[in-house]
Image (tube, rainbow, N blue to C red):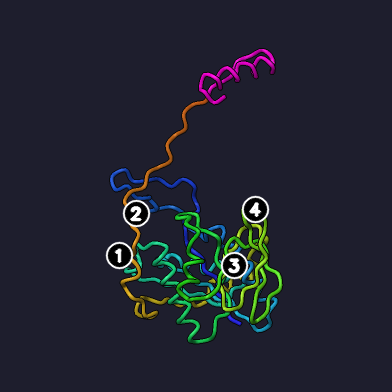
Amino acid sequence: MNIVVCVKHTPTSASVGVDPATGMVKTEGLPFGMTPLDEYAVEEALRSKEKLAGSKVFVLSLGPAGAEETLRAALALGCDEGILLTDPSFAKGDSYGTAYLLSQGVRKLAAESPVGLIFCGKQTNDGETGSVGGQLAAWLQWPSAAFVKKVGELSETAICVERAMEDGTDTLKLNLPGVVSVTKEINEPRLPSLKGKMAAKKAAVRKWAASDISADAANYGANSPCRVLKTTGVPARASGSVIAGETPEDKAKNLLIKLKEAKFV
């Protein structure tokens, strides 16, 4: 069975600024890499490959030419082939368009050899919508499960998963093909070996443009339904107050007075 894991090339720095003139995030010059939660998706795809004899893991990404680095990082871990969806027309899209383009990439790959399972990270560290996995499944008309923290029994036809919920855990069985979005509780990602790194440097990464995946321009890029009009930085927090008192009891009394003055109690 062929397994696909979707990864995204995102800034690895927490020091991301906003251009006050344009209201857009400034990414020029920032270091980039695989979005953290995608590392867990890659690991689970590799573990699934180990359970199913004869399986291959394809790592799929949507982004600029530089995203090839992230694909090679996944190849170094043990993924078999990398595919990058890259085209100038893909820019300025939203999660809807992203999921559509990924689904078209999966369809093209499946036409070569059937795909049975897709893994995604729960969310990326830039947009953080947490919706691409579900939208991808919708485009493909496959069953899906999000917030998956454990994979149980896996076969060529079905997968059993545990899904984190606000009030506990759900145990689900999905008929395959299907899409699974994972949380960081699911596993501990492996580190690349020297042999893996060397092989990844030489590996050929396929690049598919809009025409290669028969993409309909009405569903992505400039025609995406969402628009980011402006981005602002997180405002600085106001300085806190120190509650005076010689003893813990005095401080507690003074705190209560402050709370009453603020009408919290």
Residue 70 visible, this angle: no
As shown in the figure, which amino acid type bears the numbered disc 2? Val
Closer to the chain start, of discs 4 and 2, is: 4
- Distance from the alpha carbon under mark 4 to that under mark 2: 33 Å
Please tell me which residue lies in front, 145 or 185.
145
Whether the magenta-drawn stretch holds residue 256 is answered as yes
Q: Residues within 10 Å of mark 1 (few under 14, many from 20)?
A: some
Task: Give the percent coordinates (x, y) of residue 163.
Answer: 64, 62
Locate residue 90, reporting x and y percent: 35, 68
Q: Are marks 1 and 3 in contact (CB under 8 Å)?
A: no
Residue 163 inside the magenta-drawn segment: no
Q: Is residue 1 visible?
A: yes
| Numbered label attached to residue 222 | 1
| Alpha-carbon span between mark 4 and mark 1 | 40 Å
Q: In percent of the image, x 63 and y 14: which residue is there?
A: 245
Residue bearing mark 3: 42
As measured in the structure, the alpha-carbon distance from the residue carrying label 1 to the one carrying label 2 is 11 Å
- The quadrant the C terminus occupies is top right
Mark 4 nearby-residue class (10 Å; few <14, some 14–19, many ≥20): few
Foreground disc of the pair 4, 1: 4
Q: Is residue 150 left or right of residue 97?
A: right
Residue at image mark 4 = 167
Task: Give the residue type that dot 4 points to.
Answer: Asp
- Residue numbers of the magenta segment: 241-265
Cα–Cα span, label 4 and label 3: 28 Å
The amino acid at mark 3 is Val
Disc 1 marks which amino acid?
Ala
Q: Earlier in the sequence, mark 2 or mark 3?
A: 3
